[in-house]
Image: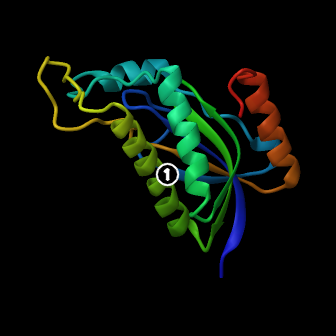
Amino acid sequence: MDFAVICVLTWPAFGTWLVGPAHGRIESCRDTEFVLPEPDEILSIERRRGLKWPVIQLDAHQREIVRLDLHRMAEFRPLVVHDTVILSNHAHALLTLNIADDQDAHHLIQLIKGATARALSVASGDRLPISTAGERLAHHKWWTRQYVMQRLQESASADRARMLLAQHFPDSVK
């Protein structure tokens, strides 16, 4: 049986990492525990050593592509997009997911990241990325494998999340 989960999903662009495990994670938090995950620059610099793919810095057009694609997905996936903040090196989305369990959440998050990556690749046209060594690569890498989905336990948490997004990124919340 599906249930609605209000959450903040945060995921970094390729070459940027959040504090914590290098792969996805799902957390539950009460209103007083909610903090907006932000990239860790020192960790990101350390993990960038030896990367084959270039570090991604989304421009304004690419950020809008991600935002629009999230809303497009909400038309046919079990999710509602409340607010988004898409920045050059990471994204935040306040969402309601209609899921059965954490496995469904993980699958839906992978669909979100995959669909937005495809939209970015299509928008880049025939321009293939160039490796850090100057070689042409066969495809783009837009996102790291990492994400943080924070389940918001109370309706006040969603209001607090919306407020934090607006405070930190007043020109980016849509």
| Mark 1 secondary-structure assignment | helix
The 10 Å Cα crowd at callout 1, few under 14, some 14 to 19, many 20 or more, is some
Q: Position of residue 158 (x, y in %)?
A: 80, 47
Q: Position of residue 142 (x, y in %)?
A: 37, 35
Q: Which quadrant, please, contains the N terminus?
A: bottom right
Say if residue 19 shows up in the picture.
Answer: no
Residue in the image at 28% along x and 23% along y: 54
Residue toward you, 51 or 64:
64
Please tell me whether residue 146 is drawn above or below residue 43 in the rendered image: below
Q: Position of residue 129 (x, y in %)?
A: 23, 27
Please tell me whether residue 10 is drawn above or below residue 137 in the rendered image: below
Say if residue 85 shows up in the picture.
Answer: yes
Is 172 displayed left or right of 123 in the figure?
right
Residue toward you, 152 or 73:
73
- For disc 1, the marked residue is 112
Is 141 displayed left or right of 90 in the figure?
left
Q: Amino acid under label 1? A: Ile
Is 5 displayed left or right of 55 in the figure?
right
Q: Which quadrant, please, contains the C terminus?
A: top right
- As drawn, the residue found furthest toward the left would be 135
Residue in the image at 48% along x and 20% along y: 59
Residue in the image at 72% along x and 20% along y: 171
The quarter of the picture where residue 139 lies is top left
Residue in the image at 53% along x and 21% along y: 60
Please tell me whether residue 58 is drawn above or below residue 22 in the rendered image: above
Is 156 displayed left or right of 150 in the figure?
right
The quarter of the picture where residue 73 lies is bottom right
Q: Position of residue 101 (x, y in %)?
A: 59, 71
- As drawn, the residue found furthest toward the right would be 156
